[in-house]
Image: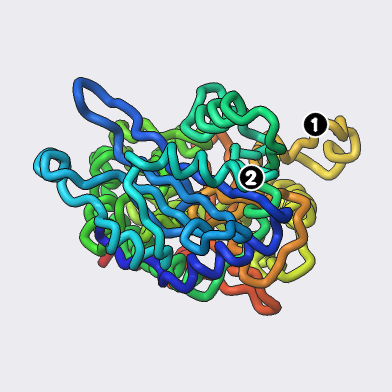
Amino acid sequence: MKYMPLSAEFYRGNRVRVSHEIASNSLVIVTSSDEYPSRGDMTHPFKQNANLLYLCGIDQEDTTLALMPWHPDKGRREVLFVKNPSPEMITWYGHRLSKAEASRISGIETVIFNEQKEDVLHEMMMYAENVYLHLPEYPRLKMTFPTSEVRFAKKLKEQYPLHAYKRLAPILYPMRSVKAPEELATLKHACEITGHAFARAARAVKPGKYEYEIEAELTYEMLRRGASGHAFAPIVAAGADTCILHYITNNKRMQDGDLLLLDFGAEYANYAGDCSRTLPVNGHFTPRQKAVYEAVLTIYKETIPRFVPGMTIHKINDFVFKRMEEEMIKLGLFTREDVQKQDKSKPLFKQYYMHNTSHFIGLDVHDVGERDWLFQPGQVLSCEPGIYIARENIGVRIETDVVVADNPIDLMKNVPVEIEDIETLMRS
């Protein structure tokens, strides 16, 4: 792998914390993500289940973790199941973890090949009253296909219908949201790589180039510095497409006078960076572009200090929405009188700022955590105000990753954000 996993002590500590939260005589089972077929005998790049990574650090397909702290046999209290690295498999697909390697990474002594998994899990089920399983619990996501977790839960409940099944997500998600020092160091490194990628890309921006050329510069620098690649499909949007929030086509030629909006982030050790910056394609903002940019930048600077313990995403949004309205009036997008007459269910600012200001960040770029959760020290969230004026082909978004603290920490503070600094970087 391209990175060093976090310490076995980190993963061991996470498992202990989960064990303290579950009911007595319970079994916890967490499965790995699927490998998704691409074409022929090929698969899409593998992306591990973040919950499995959090508990054992094994970044390999066909992995299962079973935890049963009350099992009478100490060798069955933590069991890791991995695929058997046969010589034929290694010939075709390369290195797979040995038992010793999996044990060293995870801190789990009992590592068993998958050929024995069904028998061992059956024996563990016989000692369990409750079984904790994970299925994704995101209010804005409804699973429409049977993932490995869904299939496993269905199979287990069919085979053992008299057990009590419980949700692991309410236990695991609050834990995952608060980052340990090792996680914060890893996220910081992901953000540093993201910053280097931005600097390279900004120097390459010129009228006449294609958006995908800038995407290539981002990708090259990320891979060169040890990232696994992009944490999500990058947005490289010029001109009118700066106002398309999830534009990922990245195939248009950039024109003199365009803005270029970049929303991207490096993934390092499975932790995601998330950054947005907006550039003038010709290296100089027009007066109107500058006015919109400065409005967004002002709100951005005012919002970062608000990521303190006890705050919520809802409260962050309330502040930003009010400030957006004020700045948009200054920009002439509507008047104060228009605001007084507006339909309260359809506020005018929403025409130019359609999204929310923040989301949790970690092992997933949109990590576990809800908008009404009270912020705690060590949580990491995005701060991403923006203004999008489609009729003027002006879309500006500025985004950073912030660590919640009494004095919030900007993980992207070394990525240029001031107009003068961006124009200087583009000239260098």
Q: Which mark is residue 346?
A: 1
User: Residue 9, how many percent across, how many down?
Assistant: 47, 73
Three-letter amino acid code at disc 1? Answer: Lys
In the drawing, does residue 122 fall left or right of residue 165? left
The answer to whether the residues at label 1 and label 2 have Cβ atoms under 8 Å apart is no
Three-letter amino acid code at disc 2? Answer: Tyr
C-alpha gap between disc 1 and disc 2? 42 Å
Determine the residue located farthest toward the right in the rendered image. Answer: 340
Quarter assignment of residue 24: bottom right
Using the image as rendered, state which of residue 134 and residue 416 is in the foreground.
Answer: 134
- Asked if residue 421 can be seen in this view, the reply is no
User: Residue 125, how many percent across, how many down?
Assistant: 58, 42
Q: Secondary structure at mark 1?
A: loop
For label 2, the residue is 132
Q: Which mark is residue 358?
A: none
In the drawing, does residue 218 fall left or right of residue 64? left
- Residue at 60%, 37% (x, y): give it: 135
Quarter assignment of residue 332: top right
Give the mark nearest the N terminus, 1 or 2: 2
Using the image as rendered, state which of residue 271 and residue 239 is in the foreground.
Answer: 271
Q: With respect to residue 1, does 231 lie above or below?
A: above
